[in-house]
Image (spheres, rainbow, N blue to C red):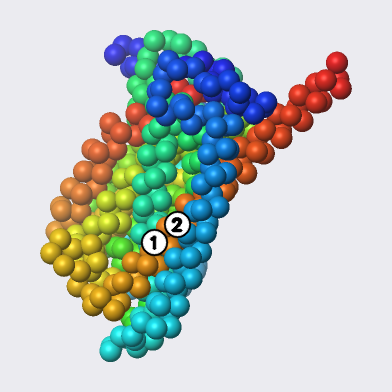
Amino acid sequence: MTGWLALLARELRLALRHPADTLAAVLFFVLVAALFPFGIGPAPEALARLAPGALLAAALLAALLPLDRLLGADAEDGSLDQLLLSGLGPAAIAAAKALAHWITTGLPLLAATPVAAAMLNLPVEAWGTAMAALGLAAAFLSLLGTAGAALTLGARRGGVLLPLIVLPLAIPSVIFGAAAIEAAAAGGTARPYLLLLAALVAAATPLAPLAAGAALRGE
Amino acid sequence: MDDASTRTLPAGGGAAPPRRSAGRGLHRFANPGRFLRLSGRILPWLTGAALAVLAVGLPWALVFSPADWQQGETVRLLYIHVPMAWLAMGGYLGLAIGSAIALVWRHPLADLACRELSPVGAAVTALCLATGSLWGKPMWGTWWVWDARLTSVLVLFFLWLGHAALVRAFDDAERGARMGAILALIGVVNLPVVKFSVDWWNTLHQPASVTRINAPAMHVDILYPLLACALGFTLAFAALVLARTRAAVMERRIRALQVAAARRADA
């Protein structure tokens, strides 16, 4: 467990030393959210109607960005091999990577959510739900994405393959996340959708690191 | 876990049977020479049976079966659409089973079969989506709706494509096969969603009407040609995959022979 925590701390320290990477993902998220008003026009009702789905799509795309380097950087300089020899199980390594990705990419997106929500004219009452839904959806994508990153590690054009593999599987989180935000914006109850989203995360928490670990072991 | 010697396919035509230590029964067919001989004998019969069944089933379904009293002639899309949907799901189940065999027993032919299965599976799923779309326009008034069944089949299509692309994306074919196998097993979570989407959600797509426990909700005039088409397409699917796997085994053998010849010329 101490080794696992040390690995997590290492990932976080690395992210702290390169804050530009995290910042780039957050900026990307805000920019994608800002593209929608240009595309569909600035009419507030139309924007509010689209806001839930646009927020989810923007967040998932932004969270996809750093996945390419999540394992790739470690594989190139050899530290991944060191990690695999360290006695930590491959699944535990993958779990630490996924958690680190969520903390360094998913959580900063939450800080930018009010900005993006305001640009998309989402009612203020739904902002809290939007942050909860985005946080859970980002956690689901971190888990799936770690498995995807492990699978495409060393592939030609791995960066192109990764979204092709991960995004179809992430569709449920978009459906439930957008439904939760929409329910909150309409004054309804978002709880069932958030619970379904949490169930997705709960199911992926043991399974995705196992798959990623199996892929890493083939390294 | 067996060593690399059983994993690589020998170039010489498989005089030596594989080691009998691990996964005995399955490894009988890991010998490429034996596989080629056996599949060479089966393939003509399989192809012939597929063509014969389709030669009866397709005219029966597309010309001689009665038109539906509500849907008219468009109901004939059923005879293509439904077998393709069954094959898309059944084929994926086969891919998952083959992947599990490849991962657990490190079975080299299972690797090759999975690699050759996914493009055929993707084509079948694309045909299922295309015929469904053509059928949806006159019946539902739209080419596409984001209904649970359609969405989950679309995800299935992406899974097929993702598998086909991932397996071929590595310079090391063995690693590609392993990654593809893991991806295929991850994708299995989608299969129950495809199957039960029409029961879990109230969708525009109709619920299952053939595979019911009591009796199919379909008249025999439509059911029998449908079953004939399904059998014919399934046989054709199997023949295609078998032929592709044979071609892949032979391709590997040619490459091994070329490498050996190049080494000889070099020495």
**Considering depth in this image, is A22 or A57 the residue closer to the camera?**
A57
- Do pointers 2 and 1 mark residues of a single chain? yes
Residue occupying image coordinates x 41% and y 77%: B60
Q: Please, which chain is the residue tagged with disc 2 on?
A: B
x and y percent of residue A55 in the render? 37, 56
Q: List the residue tagged with mark 2.
A: B235
| Secondary element type, mark 1 | helix
x and y percent of residue A51 in the render? 35, 62
Residue occupying image coordinates x 39% and y 10%: A87
Residue occupying image coordinates x 23% and y 52%: A129
Residue occupying image coordinates x 71% and y 33%: B255
Q: CA distance from mark 2 to mark 1?
A: 6 Å
Q: Do callouts 2 and 1 mark residues in contact (Cβ within 8 Å)? A: yes
For label 1, count other residues whose C-alpha is less than 10 Å away and answer few (under 14), some (14-19) or many (20+): some
Q: Please, which chain is the residue tagged with disc 1 on?
A: B
The answer, for residue A166, to whether it is visible in the render is yes
The answer, for residue A186, to whether it is visible in the render is no
Q: Amino acid at mark 2?
A: Leu
